[in-house]
Image (cartoon, grey):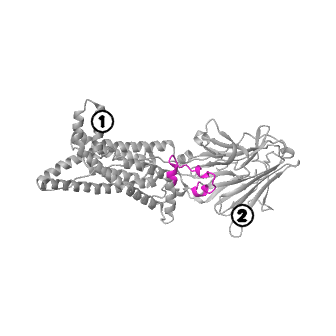
Amino acid sequence: MDRRSLLAIVITFAILIGWEVLYMAPKRNELARRQAAELESRRQADSLAALERPAGAETTAAAAPTAPAAPAAIAGEPAASGDFLAQDAGRTAKRITVSTGRANIVLSSAGGEVESVTLAEFEKKDGSPVELVPEGAAGGLRLSLLEKGEWTGLSGAAFEVTVDGAPAADGETIVLGEGRDSATVLFRRAGEGGEAVERSYTFARGSYDVSVRVAMRREGALARTEGYSLGWECGLPSTETDRKGDLRKFAALGRVGEEQYRTDMAKFGKTTRLEHEGTVVWAGARTKYFFSALITKAGKRGSGTLVLLGDRAENFIGCGIAYPFRGDPRLVEDVFTWYAGPLDMKALSGYGLGLEKAIDMGYLRFLSVGVLRLMVWMKKGIPNYGLIIIIISVLTKLLFYRLTHKSFKSMKDMQRLQPRIKEIQEKWKGDRDRLNKEIMKAYKEAGVSPLGGCLPLLLQMPIFIALYNALGNTIELRGAPFVGWIDDLSMPDTLFRWGASVPILGNEFHLLPILMGAAMIAQSKLGGSPTGEGAPAMQAKMMNWMMPIIFTIFFYSMPSGLVLYWLVNQVLSVAQQYIVQREIESEEQNRALAGAEK
């Protein structure tokens, strides 16, 4: 969760608690006094009646969208270094497509790079598969060589290509399935002086993992090279309808030793490249929901440099790993695992390397992860995440039922204390410190808390934030439908659109926040006016309408799953308030009858 979203949530809860303390609590006290007076008068006439009940509670947050990417180099412009490193622009590149069942990867003999990655299990709003390489971008797992302090990318160099040892034809497609569980595509470029570069990709059926091998013979034109780098320098495209929110999640990440690094794209301004030296474990670039990462092989992790790339002006994010040639080796060989797929909590946790921390779960990560795992577990038996959210809302209400019940009782006890509080205020009005001590002493002796009505709200705030993080940032809930027009619980529900953009509403009509606002108005109406006259009545009228309007605006751009959670929570709150109020009224009536009999 970004700071703006967290601030919106905190401000919302602050407004809600302020409303509870400054408006609803006095309103309840006034109503309770009126009820007691009415009950007493009716007792004297031997008749009893029921009264009314007040309301109050809600919260808010913000959502997030997406954007495209542009290429950058791990270390500057190519440097001329003989024929071997020349860019063979005149040769037509061959393209090889490998389908693993989960992804379709297109490789090019120009540099032996990744030209396209489409994910078969994930679609964009227009129905097309998610693509992880921006259109027309080069540098997908670009191999670069360092010589005389300058880096040369091999993107334009022509490589010979074979598939499982046999020469490959341009446009060849390899489909992994029954009878073929793996395939290796090898790219090789050799020079007249004995120099050679090989890079290979080994694909496995039904996997997002690709084994990537880099090997070099440092003879001839490569004898003076000082190091090499492998990087995701093509960037990542925006894949979501909410483009701005998607772009806010773009980040370059990595791990060096036990230290993890993350730099959001927004922080790449004048600086477009950051380096962290040490034992590189992995390097990655992510969007809101998708991830490309290079993972070094355990047991062969040498000292190198984690390179984080970004350019906010170009909506570009990338990463790389660079290694120097220490000891002037003639033969160099390294093996990596390349992951290109969704930010899936279970899959990334399986590596045991902290890759799952690439998923942005906000400031309450442990609770957000717990909520996500609970929802995924419930999905095994409940087919719809919308139903799961409703069940979680009901469970939350049951969890805090007794506490909320107690808070209502506490408010009633506070009302009974009002005569004594007024006496204390009158007696110690000239001594503020003594006044506060005496009031708190009275509360303590009566066993009540002046903040009792706020406690249930405060305790629910972490659950709200955790659910917001789970709904807005996890691939499991991306595109999860509920019913009817609610076709994506991670996005606001859109009933219909119109042409022109309207302030606050934009060009979409979101029904759930409107229903929530209407529920708030109805809930406020149940409480009536605190006094029914003068300025307080006007104040009540304003609060009865202004607070629902404010919260409708807060909720308007939230994920529909979160609004659904609070809508259900509020409906249950109304029912609970009715039950508790009837209990309080019954107690008052019994107390009045007992007094009459005496």
Span colored in magenta:
343-369
Considering depth in this image, is 146 or 237 the residue closer to the camera? 146
Considering depth in this image, is 565 or 245 the residue closer to the camera? 565
Categorize mark 2 by other alpha carbons within 10 Å: few (<14), some (14-19), many (20+): some
Left or right: 578 with respect to 208?
Answer: left
Give the label, 2 or 1, closer to the camera. 1
Tell which residue pokes out farthest to the bottom in this image: 179
Q: Which mark is residue 522?
A: none
Residue underneath mark 1: 436
Categorize mark 1 by other alpha carbons within 10 Å: few (<14), some (14-19), many (20+): some
Name which quarter of the figure residue 123 lies in.
Answer: bottom right
Left or right: 20 with respect to 300?
Answer: left
Left or right: 350 with respect to 594?
Answer: right
Q: Residue at x 55, y 52 (%)?
A: 240
Residue underneath mark 2: 182
Q: Which of disc 1 and disc 2 is earlier in sequence?
A: 2
Q: Position of residue 385 (x, y in %)?
A: 48, 60
Tell which residue pokes out farthest to the left in this image: 45
Q: Secondary structure at mark 2?
A: strand
Callout 2, which amino acid? Ser
Q: Position of residue 216 (x, y in %)?
A: 81, 50
Callout 1, which amino acid? Asn
Tell which residue pokes out farthest to the top in this image: 430
Q: Position of residue 268 (x, y in %)?
A: 61, 39
